[in-house]
Structures are given as C-alpha cells and as structure tokens.
Amino acid sequence: MNKIRYICLDDETDTVKPVLARLCSTRADLEIVALPPLAFEEQLARIQKELEIGLDGIILDLRLDRRIPADGQRAVRYTAPGLAAQLRNCQATKASQAGFPIILWSVQSLLEKSFYPDVTNQDLFDSIYTKQQVAENETQIALELVDFVNGYKYINENQKAKLKVSDLLAVPNGVILDERMNNDLNSGPGKLPAFVYARFIFEQIINQPGPLMGKSVLYSRLGVALDSPEPLERIISKNCAYRGPFGIAWPRWWAAAVDAWWDKVFPKSPMLERIPAPERVEKIRTKFNLPNLKAADVPKGKSPYFSTVCEVTNMPLDPVDGFMIKSKEPMLWQRRRYISRDVAMDPAKYNFRGQLDPMESARIQQIRSNGKKK
Amino acid sequence: MAKKNNNSVAGSRREIELLATKVRKEWSELSRILRELSVCADTGPLDSPVYGLDTSGCFLQMTNLVLRFSPAALKCLPSNLEELDCRLSARVGLPYGLGDDDICKDPLSNLSVEIDLRGMTSTGELLIHCWHLDRHPEYSAAKKGDVGISAAHPRYHFHFGGRRIKQFAGEMGLDSLGSIMLFDGPRLPHPPLDAVLAVDMLFSNFSPLAWAKLRESADYVRLITISQRRLWRPYARSLVSHWGEDGNKSGWLATDPWPHLL
C-alpha cells in the first residue's frame, strides 16, 4: 500500500515522536516523520527533494524559532507562517509544483499569543490543531490528515485553467449550484493554484452552513433525534451525500438534494421546512416502516420548524427561537449560525465565548430586561 | 412541425428562466436593503431561494424569513405582548409564456404566502396569529360539485387561520383557541404578493417606523414598483375591464380574481 506521507517539522522532535506514532497507529495508510527544522534555504531545498521522492503534506510547529533549553540557542530564526508563505508561493508560481496540505500545530497558549493576533497569516494553513486536540482525537485527526491529502490529489488531478469550483464538487444530478459561488472564488486572470480551491472548498463550503450541511443539521431538518437507534443515513438517498474533496473526514449532505428527495418520496407533502418536525418523522416512519426512528424533542414553547442547530448544544433549532452569532458577512449562498435562547440568556453556563450578531444585541438586552427566562 | 414545437417550448423555457433569474436578483436586492437598514437580521432565505422548473413554469420558494417586530408600537389584545416574531414563506410560480410586462394575463401559475406571527406575553404565554395568501387552483368538474368548493374562491385570496393555527393548538394541547372561531373562510380577494410585496405588507402593518424607513430608500421603492407593476397591474386591469372602463378587455376575466362580481 502506498502510504500517505507527512513530515512534521518541530523543534522538539523527541517529544512529538510518540504523539505522532500514536496518530499513525490508528491507520495503516499514514506515515508521519518528525524532523528538526533546518535553516530557511536549506529547509526549502530539503522539502523540494522530499516532494520529488514522495511527500504528501507538511505539519509545522508554530514556534520553530524557540531557544533550545539545553544551550539557549535557536535552531532556526523563522516561524511556521514564514515557511508556509514561501511554500504556498512555490505552489502558486511553479507550474510543476502540485498543491499539498500544510497543517499547523501548537499549544493553545502559543497560538493565542503568537498566531491569532496576526490575521495576515490565517489563510496559509489547511487546518490548525492544538497538540491537546491531537492527543485526544487521534483517530479523527489521522482521518482528516489523510483526507486533506486525498482532497488535494483530487484537485491537482482535475485542475484546469480557470476551473470552476462547481466542477470540483461532484454535484449530484438535480442540484443546481448557485452560480455566484464561482464568482466568490475570486478568480483573477489565469490559473489558480490548487490550495486556493482547497481552502475555498474547505472553509467556505464544507465548514459553513449553506449548500452543504453536516449530520446534526441533516437530522434537525428531518426532525430526527441525533441518537435515533434507526439512523437516517440508511434511508436517505445516496444521491444526497457529498462526494467531493474532504467529504470523508467531514461528512456532508447537499441541502437541495435532501429537499428533492423529500419532494420525490412525499410528492403531496408541503416542502420539508414548512411542516413541523414531529410530522416529518411520522411521515418517514410510515413510509419506510421504521418504528424505531426517534423524533427529536420539541421543547415546550419552542417552534417545531427545525432547520438548523444550536452551535453550542447541537440541539435542533428553528431560527425564530435562536440568536444569530457574529460572523464575517456571509456570501449570498451561505447561511448564518445560531445559538439557542437558553445559551444566549446564560452564555457562561454553556461555556459560550462567542459574540452575538450586533443586530441581536438589542433583542437579547430587551429580553433580559424583561426579566424572563423561557 | 415537431421540431418547431420543441423550439417554442425551449424558447418559452428560456424566457421564463430569464424572468425567474430577474426575480431572484430582486429578492437578493431586497435582502441587501433589509440588512443595510437594519430591519432584518438574517436575510439568508431571500438570498438563496429554492428554484426550479415544474409542469406549469418556473417556481421560486423562499422559506422561513424571520422578521422581528416591536409590540410596543402596536395595539394588541392582550396588551402585555413583549415579543412578536414573524415567519414568512413565499412560493411563486411564473407560468410558461409570460412576458415580464404582460398585462392581459394572470401573472402567476402558483402562489402561496404564509405568514405566521408568534407573540409572547409578559407572563410567558405563547400566542399565534396566521395569515395565508393563496392562488386557488383550477378544480376539475367533479370536484366543483363539493359543497366546500362551491364557496367563493377568489383566484387570489387571504385567509386568516389555516393549518398552522390548528397545529399550534395541537402543540399547546388545546381543543380550541379561547373565544375565537376558526373557519375555512372567508377567503378575501387580495392582489397577489411575492416575497417583496409580502415583506412590504408586513412592515406596513406591524412596524410602521421600519416601513417609513424602507420607503425612504430609492432602491426599495424601485423594487416595490417593479413587483407591483408585474403583479398588480394585470390584476387591476382585469378588474377594471369588467366595466369596460378601459375599452380594451383583459384576457383575464375579472370574475376569476373577484367571483362576487355580477
């Protein structure tokens, strides 16, 4: 089997080796080699050589430039974003250079101190993991590392001059993709490097609600409890599943395909979002003879027209009962994220540290001043 | 001959798709205006309506746009309303063979505008208020014999109550809604609304201050004018032609939108 091969540049190779070994032990197809960083030019030359002999991705520790405790010297004088910027530049300008994923990892405190304040760096990495996250979610993160490589390979293979993003998404029959999505990729003159497609697909399409939805939103939209003993995936049309880049580690479903599936299975029913969630489940139960399909609870006094989930509790939610979270202005084909009223009323209790959209501030203040908690 | 027919079907399809694209742009423009004037927080449903072709033409469906109104500016019974949220959905069908400025035909093949208002009182009681605007379908001769069908069915009509109120009663475990009676009618003739005109109708009735702010926007006024011209001009022409006032009869008989006319 051809293994997927990453190198991991870290100034503390002895410390990270056992962590990486555990990560690789979860999959036979993943190999990660820990290496100490070299001087900048030498490092670039080494990576080029590695790419020629078979390198699929790079993991970078954030502070490669820390002083080594033993002798107080710095191994190198650059940090991960500096190296990543140069690698991205090579991917963008060298025609022979295929795209590959660049992953950042560090400890939370260093990310907060040295990485997040510099917003110009934030689009360089395909993913950012804390070392604690890696230790706690080895199986999932190993899967993600593999899927990043496979996604890049797919994009590299399919890349043509001025490729439309919609061509890469393996859109199923019957789903019409919003044409504005192609414009939003910001395609300038000439060919875009693979990482631009990869970053756009991953950040804007996989990780934002819109044309695609994750498992919890899929269940919410069909009114089914996430812990239903009868899984929805068994009955929902296979046509609804997303099969484009990164869709293995991050399973997604096409919202429009789910609507079309509903209309086909229940041609006389109103549109999915126009009927209360318990009624949606009852229809599916009857049609497919699934007595064990469990309906999501509708809390008393809350709307049963679920279409999203609370970002904090993951419980189904009708936006009418929710509060919009602050975010960058979404693209026209994207949807907003919500938290439930309970979380908005008592963020500390739910460990919610985000902010509400400014347009929701007056509303929550009014509700709080009304002194009720419903 | 067959080829000619196919060509004309394709042409008709192209025309209606172009019109649907135009309407989608108008809804998206409305979304931008609502956000800019801070009168609606999440206008996503207007930006990405579901759309496609069916047997009668092209449809656009905008689902669950949430508008939040201040009850302080409204007279309501009960008077202790503290929150008032509205969920608006609109499905519009544009028929094959319709031009953008076709004033002698019914401009839509399908219409459903659902307005669900949910209030909360200072004591935490949930209240509901629903309106529904329909385009009534053509019935077969057999169905026309039904007593229910014999009642007046203006082509476009508003109806208070409907399915949603009955569902709400079920959700709240109620057999009835206090002293209010709910009937299948009356069905009140009203000119058709699309998402733009429905939003205007809601602000005009439930948030006069926001409505005034919207109508100060030249872009908003332009959008309203386009929708009114597309939907209300043929409707008005149909009605006025009943008396032959314009000397030029509409192809859309006035007794269709207004069956009470004699």
Image (cartoon, coloured by chain):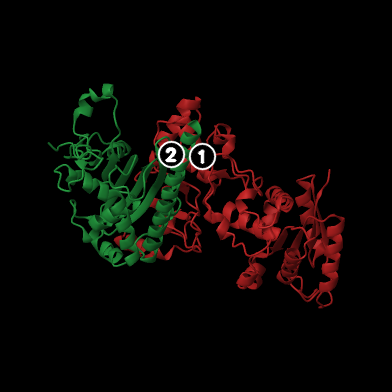
Q: Chain of mark 1?
A: A
Q: Residue furthest bottom?
A: A72
Determine the secondary structure under disc 1: helix
Q: Count neighbours of disc 2 (C-alpha within 10 A) and say few if under 14, some if 14 to 19, many if 20 or more.
A: many
Identify residue type, mark 1.
Val
**In what quadrant of the picture does the C terminus of chain B appear?**
top left
Q: Amino acid at mark 2?
A: Leu
Give left or right: position of A185 versus B222.
right
Image location of residue B219, percent across then percent down: 35, 64
The residue to which callout 1 is attached is A258
Mark 2 element type: helix
- The alpha-carbon separation of the residues under discs 2 and 1 comes to 9 Å
- Asked where in the image residue B69 lies, by quadrant, the reply is bottom left
Q: Which chain is green?
A: B
- Residue reaching furthest to the left: B262
Residue labelled with disc 2? A272
Mark 2 and mark 1 on one chain: yes
The answer to whether residue A223 is visible is: no
Q: Does B1 sit above or below residue B79?
A: above
Image coordinates for residue B112, horizontal then vertical, percent = 33, 42
Count of marks placed on residues: 2
**Chain A, chosen colour in render:** red
Quarter where residue A196 is shown: bottom right
Crowding near pointer 1: few (<14 within 10 Å), some, many (20+)?
many
Q: Please report whichever mark, 2 or 1, sits nearer to the chain's N-terminal start.
A: 1
Q: Are marks 2 and 1 in contact (CB under 8 Å)?
A: yes
The spot of residue A343 in percent (x, y) is: 44, 56
Residue at the location (68% across, 58% down)? Answer: A132
